[in-house]
């Protein structure tokens, strides 16, 4: 949600975290962010969204379908998200495995 072309600290932190994690070879790190169109390149995944703040380029996703599809394809061991994800209908989904069974 707060990852945009000019969002500053959050974007910088996530990009650096991904770079270090992937360079270590110990684990994969993927970032799923709102973008102008759906795009998947390496560990960066963009889902279609609307721009809500012209000043910093922040965007809001157009629903959760593309996000859920991306998570199903990636099959992550865990997901770290921001506190707003519950507002978009994913609250219960975050504790489920890709096949729909509950985790933890």
Image (spheres, rainbow, N blue to C red):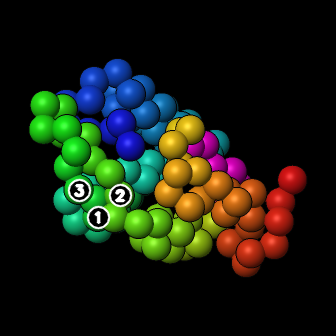
Q: Is residue 80 magenta?
A: yes
Name the residue rendered at 35%, 58% in the picture.
61
Q: Position of residue 47 (x, y in %)?
A: 34, 62
* Mark 2 or mark 1, earlier in chain: 1
Name the residue rendered at 26%, 29% in the picture.
7
Q: Secondary structure at mark 1?
A: strand
Displayed quadrant of residue 63 = bottom left
Dividing the image into 4 quarters, which one contains the N terminus? top left
Residue under label 1, please give it. 48
Residue under label 2, please give it. 61
Name the residue rendered at 25%, 40% in the picture.
58
Few, some or many residues within 10 Å of mark 2 (<14, 14–19, 20+): many
Residue under label 3, please give it. 50
Viewer-closest of 35 and 23: 35
* Disc 2 and disc 1 in contact, CB within 8 angstroms: yes
What is the CA distance from the residue labelled 1 to the residue labelled 3?
Answer: 7 Å
Name the residue rendered at 74%, 64% in the picture.
96
Residue 48 in the figure: left or right of residue 95: left
User: Which stretch is magenta?
Assistant: 76-81
Residue 89 in the figure: left or right of residue 53: right
Which disc number belongs to residue 6?
A: none
Residue 36 in the figure: left or right of residue 91: left
Few, some or many residues within 10 Å of mark 1 (<14, 14–19, 20+): many
Viewer-closest of 78 and 49: 49
Would residue 41 be visible to someone looking at this image?
no
Displayed quadrant of residue 26 = top right
């Amino acid at each position: 949600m707060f990852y945009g072309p000019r969002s500053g600290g959050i974007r910088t932190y996530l990009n650096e975290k991904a770079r270090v994690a992937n360079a270590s070879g110990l684990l994969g790190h993927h970032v799923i962010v709102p973008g102008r169109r759906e795009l998947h390149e390496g560990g960066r995944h963009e889902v279609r969204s609307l721009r809500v703040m012209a000043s910093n380029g922040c965007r809001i996703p157009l629903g959760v379908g593309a996000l859920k599809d991306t998570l199903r394809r990636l099959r992550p061991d865990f997901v770290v998200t921001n506190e707003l994800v519950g507002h978009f209908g994913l609250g219960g989904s975050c504790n489920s495995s890709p096949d729909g069974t509950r985790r933890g």
